[in-house]
Image (tube, grey):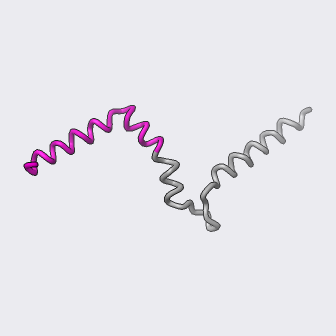
Amino acid sequence: MAHTAGRTATRMRVRWASIADFGTRPGGSRHPLVAAAMVLPLAILLGFAFGAVEAVVTQASSVAGMLGH
């Protein structure tokens, strides 16, 4: 019974490592589209959570006003 915790932890590390390796190339680098697909949902969520969308709209309207559109 004492050795089962170590095996379970090892299996979980292997499982997480295989998930983290998704989209990696043989050289160890991740494809840019896979990286973007991993990051964009969190970036969008944080943008809405902290009001960045309103800030971008405000800046865009200011620039449009300066350009005369």
Q: Is residue 59 left or right of residue 26?
A: left
Q: In this view, does 26 lie to the left or right of 63?
A: right
The image shows residue 11 at horizontal and vertical percentages of 78, 44
Q: Nearer the viewer, residue 6 or 57?
A: 57
Q: Taken as a whole, is the magenta stretch helix, strand or loop? A: helix
> Can you name the residue that lies furthest to the bottom here?
27
For the N terminus, give its image quadrant: top right
Residue 27 occupies which quadrant of the picture? bottom right
Total number of numbered discs in the rendering? 0
The image shows residue 61 at horizontal and vertical percentages of 17, 42
Q: Is residue 44 magenta?
A: yes
From the viewer's perspective, is residue 19 above or below residue 50? below
Q: Is residue 6 left or right of residue 13?
A: right
Q: Is residue 62 magenta?
A: yes
Q: What is the magenta range? A: 41-69
From the viewer's perspective, is residue 29 above or below residue 40? below
The image shows residue 38 at horizontal and vertical percentages of 52, 48
> Residue at the location (10% across, 48% down)?
69
The image shows residue 39 at horizontal and vertical percentages of 48, 47
From the viewer's perspective, is residue 4 above or below residue 67? above
> Can you name the residue that lies furthest to the right here?
1
> Residue at the location (31% across, 38% down)?
53
> Can you name the residue that lies furthest to the left here?
68
> Residue at the location (68% across, 46% down)?
16
Residue 3 occupies which quadrant of the picture? top right
> Residue at the location (26% across, 38% down)?
55
Q: Is residue 6 left or right of residue 54?
A: right
